[in-house]
Amino acid sequence: MVRDNIAVLTEDWNELERCSDSWCQEQVRLITDQLLEQTDIEGIRALLSEMSHKNLDETVSYAARMLEHLFKLKYCNQSDAVSHWRREISEYRRQLISLFDNGKNRDLLTTYRKDLCDRMWKQSIKLYKADALDYIELQSGIQKIPKENPYQPEDLLELALKELLEKLN
């Protein structure tokens, strides 16, 4: 029974993807042919809006994970995990840099600066607190996390690790 439901969902998803691809191709054709009165302007607007928020959500996620590991590195003396946290910070930074490579998506840093800063800070604290529930050595760091976010999004892309850690003082 469950297998049948999965098959139906998979078929539905494949059909949805086919319809979506067809719709996009049709919209490109209509624009190319300058048949703008037949173009689904509202659908295109919604798709572009969704795409721009996807990039913002990815940015928040990578930045929050990076900050979470900065907190761990700064506030926990668990020496056996330090190299792991450093690798995680490097990996999340690499992911962030790839999002903004060659200037693409740089407008997110200006257009959504306040939202981005607030969301990445709040999410990073939630992530750290969630881990602190399972790892007692992280619990003392909760009170040490600054109330206000000392980082601008560009800091996470450009500052050296030492400078990032100093901003947490």
Image (cartoon, rainbow, N blue to C red):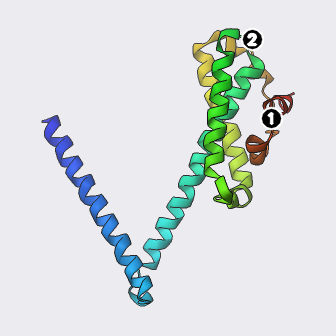
* Left-right relation of 56 to 42: right
Tell me the residue at 51%/66% (across/down).
48
Three-letter code for the amino acid on which mark 2 is drawn: Asn
From the image, tell me which residue sits under label 1: 160
Quadrant of the image occupied by residue 25? bottom left
Above or below, comparing residue 96 to residue 108 in the picture = above
Q: Nearer the viewer, mark 1 or mark 2?
A: 1
Tell me the residue at 73%/46% (across/down).
117
Name the spot of residue 35 as percent of width and height, x first: 41, 90
At label 2, counting other C-alpha atoms closer than 10 Å, the crowd grade (few under 14, some 14-19, many 20 or more) is few
Task: Say which label, 1 or 2, has the lower sequence index.
Answer: 2
At label 1, counting other C-alpha atoms closer than 10 Å, the crowd grade (few under 14, some 14-19, many 20 or more) is few
* Left-right relation of 27 to 138: left
Above or below, comparing residue 84 to residue 121 in the picture = above
Residue nearest the observer in this picture, 82 or 70: 82
From the image, tell me which residue sits under label 2: 77
User: Which label belongs to residue 42?
Assistant: none
Question: Number of numbered discs present?
Answer: 2
Mark 1 vs mark 2, CA separation in Å: 20 Å
Evaluate whether residue 123 shows in this view: no
Name the spot of residue 137 as percent of width and height, x first: 68, 10
Placement of the C terminus among the 4 image quadrants? top right
Tell me the residue at 23%/47% (across/down).
10
Placement of the N terminus among the 4 image quadrants? top left
Evaluate whether residue 52 shows in this view: yes
Residue nearest the observer in this picture, 32 or 137: 32
* Left-right relation of 115 to 34: right
Three-letter code for the amino acid on which mark 1 is drawn: Ala
Mark 1: secondary structure: loop
Mark 2: secondary structure: loop
Quadrant of the image occupied by residue 106? bottom right
